[in-house]
Image (tube, grey):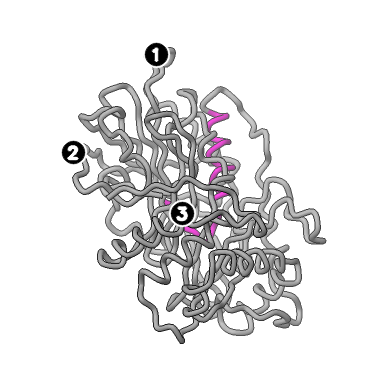
Amino acid sequence: MSIPPSSPLVFSARHCEPELIVPAAPTPYELKQLSDIDDQEGLRFHLPFIMFYSNNPLMVQKDPVKVIKAALAKALVYYYPFVGRLREEHNRKVLVVDCTGDGILFVEANADITLEQLGDTIQPPCPYIEELLRDVPGSNGILGCPLLLIQMTRLTCGGYIFAVRLNHTISDSLGLVQFLNTVAEMASGSCVPSKQPVWQRQILNARDPPRITCIHHEYEILTACLWKCRTIALEVDPNDVVCLSCMINLRGKQRMKLQVPNGYYGNAFAFPTVLSKAELLCKNPLGYALELVKKTKAEMSEEYLRSVADLMVIKGRPPYITAGNFLVADTTQVGFSGIDFGWGKPVYGGPSGAIPFVSFDARLKNHKGEDGVVVPIWLPLPAMERFQLELLKITQEPVDQSYGIMPTKITSML
């Protein structure tokens, strides 16, 4: 877990003019409807990810920007909805991709800095994200804008940085990794993806007629620990109800009748929510929060997911509750750390940081070679200082084996 360094390295990247990358071969011109899970108001935002790659002496004769640009064009033949634009149909009741073939945005850049100089600052939250993933004017809308923005930045050491911004309505992080692995295959000389992309968004649509059958408050030990410390740090009224929403991926869930097809790259997750009075959460041992989290995750089912889709249709796609809510998305098993475009696996790959009420768990190997999980968290400065104090307290508490709590090394950096 990290808090941004107080004195990050100062540098600027030299950016080329943005360009559009289109598929390397003709693709269908058609409308493709998103699912009712895709079309949630709470997913109408852009999600940034970043990967840092070291120099590979065996690839010294190849320019990673040229190689990956060509591979992107080849992969987009199979993932052609990414080069389309979103639009609303039927008075905003349906969100569709207009497969126009307009392209994804790509920015080439260079920076006079080495990966070694960046050191541990590559871990989220990335203090240089505005330089490494420049917001192209007019590109950050949801409708009528590019669905992907990619920036590649060459470093003087021969390494490079690959940053990508995803319109969350068209895909989740697992779907994005699936696409990027296809790009990696194309960069290595493949002509056909080893995993064929599957659209089939209708499998996650509302039922006919729709019916809400579950309570949706949202419209591991680490998660429980963060929730408790954050609530104490924010000095929430003891009588207020606070919420924790945990992202649960639906792929590969054998106990569910609904099986998400292999190759599906749409949004396939839900955010079941646990509630507690702030006083109970803050005053009880950590095991109290842990049991609530475990119970909520156990309640996830096909019926719950169907009910979410139905709620979107019946209630007019309400946004997630943000007041008093803390949303945690675990990306440690998503696969960013394994994406190899030919220069080896990234030193770090995953989310670039947090947003005000959302934190992302990500895998990290620090400069000492130690593996860990990094969780950026967004708080006002006074609350951040209280958060650190609570974190230190809670990590010094005796281990409660009855809750299955294992000793955890948690560090922070000012």
Report the span colored magenta. 165-186
Q: Nearer the viewer, residue 65 or 43?
A: 43
Q: Residues within 10 Å of mark 3 (few under 14, many from 20)?
A: some
Q: Position of residue 63 (x, y in %)?
A: 37, 22
Q: Position of residue 274 (x, y in %)?
A: 59, 73
Mark 1, secondary structure of its residue? helix
Give the residue type that dot 3 points to.
Thr
Give the residue type that dot 1 points to.
Pro
Q: Position of residue 127 (x, y in %)?
A: 27, 47
Q: Is residue 303 above or below residue 404?
A: below
The residue mark sitting in front, 3 or 2, is 3
- The residue identified by callout 1 is 57
Q: Is residue 152 above or below residue 190?
A: below
Give the residue type that dot 2 points to.
Phe
- The residue identified by callout 2 is 11
User: Distance of mark 3 from mark 1, alpha carbons?
Assistant: 42 Å
Tally the numbered discs.
3
Q: Nearer the viewer, residue 266 or 255?
A: 255
Name the residue rendered at 30%, 44% in the picture.
18
